[in-house]
Amino acid sequence: MISHAILASLFSALVWLVAVGALVKCKKLAPLPAILLFSLPLLVGNLYYYGWISPEREQQAQIDAATAHLARLPVWRTVKEQQPGLYQQAYIELVNSLEDGVPEQQAIEHLRPLVADLLNQRINAARDEDLNSYMQISLEEMKQMRQRGASECFRFLFPQVKGGVNVSKLLPEDLTGRELQAMDLLLKHSGGVDQPIDLKQGRVQLQAVVRQLYERWGSDLQTLNTPAETGVNEAKLCDMTIDLYQSVLALPDKDSANVLRIIISGTGS
């Protein structure tokens, strides 16, 4: 389909050609200047359109497509319904990133901390099965990142220390897709009151897990509390974190969810 801009250009060129042709026919303008007079406005117009107008429209089309994609994504679709203020913040950040030339997928990845904060707020209200399912997938991601390397794993687990990673580039699409679905399910069913937490039993079970980990890792286990410490062993920190969550998720479902809430909320001591 021919765009309106091209039709307008063709029409303008035709009118200009007729006008210049009339001047030549009346011998008021020599052929060479006539050619230049005809060509120059077209050249300037095309430079203006393809150098400014067209790229601007193309960028806006990309932004429109990306924001529409965001609204369809699991998690963000739910956030838009439940937390319109947070969604608007994500929308603005996405547009700003795209205008700065950040690729769409990477720009969407930059929004992960916003979702992570919301998930942490909802953990206590989440259903046991949703919490366990989400953390099982998170554990898979940790293991995949560890296979990639200690640095990637460390940055994935502790983005506040060394900056995060581009998850979409480093993890299989199937895995990140399942993560989005699990996060979405957790958010959809965590809008009510908090689940009861058995602090006494949970702390006993957490202490039992820690004792087992201490037998394997010794005093190095304490560095889980200080990942930003200079000279920390990134590989060992990743391995210990994986070991911790793997041990917790090995508990019966209700117990593992209870202990996970204690760990995430920081009420384990």
Image (cartoon, rainbow, N blue to C red):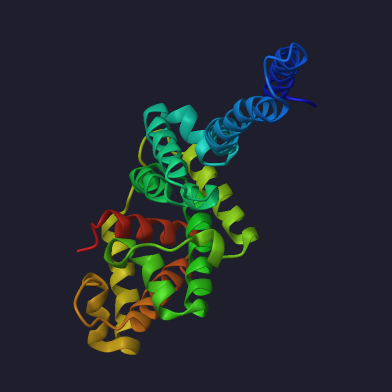
Left or right: 86 with respect to 207? Answer: right
**Residue sitting at 50 percent across and 61 percent down?**
167
Question: Quadrant of residue 88 in the image?
Answer: top left
Locate residue 114, reporting x and y percent: 37, 45
At x 61%, y 30%, the residue is 40
User: Looking at the picture, does residue 45 appear above or below residue 104?
Assistant: above
Left or right? Give the position of 45 relative to 161. Answer: right
Q: Nearer the viewer, residue 20 or 129?
A: 20
Q: Is residue 241 left or right of residue 60?
A: left
Q: How many numbered badges does the structure rendering display?
A: 0
Q: Is residue 54 left or right of residue 204?
A: right
Give the quarter of the image for residue 172: bottom right
User: At 25% across and 81% down in the image, what residue appears?
Assistant: 232
Q: Looking at the picture, tell me which residue is in the foreground, 91 or 49.
A: 49
As drawn, 83 above or below 151: above
Percent coordinates x, y for residue 160 in the rendering: 29, 61
* Up-down relation of residue 7 to residue 135 (above or below): above
Quarter of the image with the C terminus is bottom left
In the image, farthest residue toward the right:
1
- Name the image quarter holding the N terminus: top right
Looking at the picture, how far across and down is residue 198, in whole percent?
Answer: 31, 54
Residue 221 in percent (x, y) is at 27, 80
Q: Residue at x 19, y 75 (%)?
A: 229
